[in-house]
Amino acid sequence: MTTERDIDDVSRTWTKLGGEDPMWAVLTDRGKSRRRWGPEEFLATGVTEIEAVLARLAELGLDVGRGRALDFGCGAGRLSHGLAVAGFGEVLGCDISPTMLAKAREIVPDAACRFVQVTGSDLAAIETGSVDLVYSCRVLQHMPPALAHGYVREFRRVARPGGVVVFQMPTRPSSTVAGRVLGGLPVPVARVLRRGMEMHGTPEPEVRRLVESLGARVVAADPDTSAGPRWDSRLYVTTGA
């Protein structure tokens, strides 16, 4: 069950990280810590990622309208920028961290982008059936599963009929030595090792059951490296049944 404490914990963690080094906290390249990401270089990675996602959707035969996109857990706005460059007329970037949103508003140049703070376990500010594409990557892994699953339900609610929801979620610690060690650590210890970032996973069969319970279907569950080498992860592509 999701609690207000879960939401407060996630908000506190990412507000702190956003105040310290927001671009690195979003994209943890070892060579870019201590504020070594430049805004243009950082935003360019979002353009590349969104291009790859849209190419994959085209491979799957999914026709995605270019009206409204939702970047959930937008952080400093790199993927919101990528969605705007891809031609979406309106991009809504949502995040729980005010410091991350402040950085996004500072560095993202696109008039199509609007950034809003998520303050609870739902997306009440977004109308039902109003979004052509929901995209979330490197986000749900950092919150307790019950909270993450609740947001997946909200993704489907805000997606228009036939809209596409794409989200990344780890399945389990990987079978590497480091992954097995990580999987055996208490959450507080693992959090210290990741500089305050919690990591959580959900087995793929459970994710599939969740999506199907919402009247949707999983079109693809692609292996994904966004969670790093210590976790097995999937990028789920879903659409209305």
Image (tube, rainbow, N blue to C red):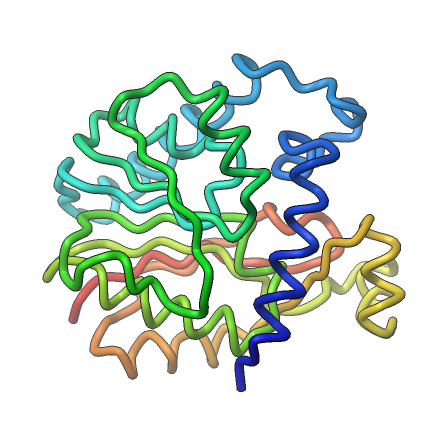
Q: How many marks?
A: 0
Foreground pick, 24 / 219: 24
Q: Quick check: 221 left or right of 181?
A: left
In the foreground, 112 or 206:
112
**Extreme residue in the bottom direction:** 1
Q: Position of residue 196 (x, y in %)?
A: 79, 53
Q: Where is 112 relative to 152, above or below? A: above
Q: Position of residue 28 (x, y in %)?
A: 70, 36
Check the picture and name the quadrant holding the C terminus. bottom left
Q: Residue at x 67, y 65 (%)?
A: 9
Taking the spot 65% from the left edge, 39% from the top edge, the residue there is 18
Q: State the image coordinates of residue 32 (x, y, percent, origin top left).
A: 74, 23
Which of 109/31 is in front? 109
- Residue placed at 29% from the left, 36% from the top? 54
Q: From the viewer's perspective, is residue 140 above or below residue 172?
A: above
* Residue occupying the point 38% across, 38% down: 115
> Residue 220's image quarter?
bottom left
The quadrant holding residue 173 is bottom right
58 with respect to 113 (left or right):
left
Please say if 29 is above or below 187. above
Q: Position of residue 156 (x, y in %)?
A: 26, 66
- Position of residue 20 relative to residue 147, above or below, is above
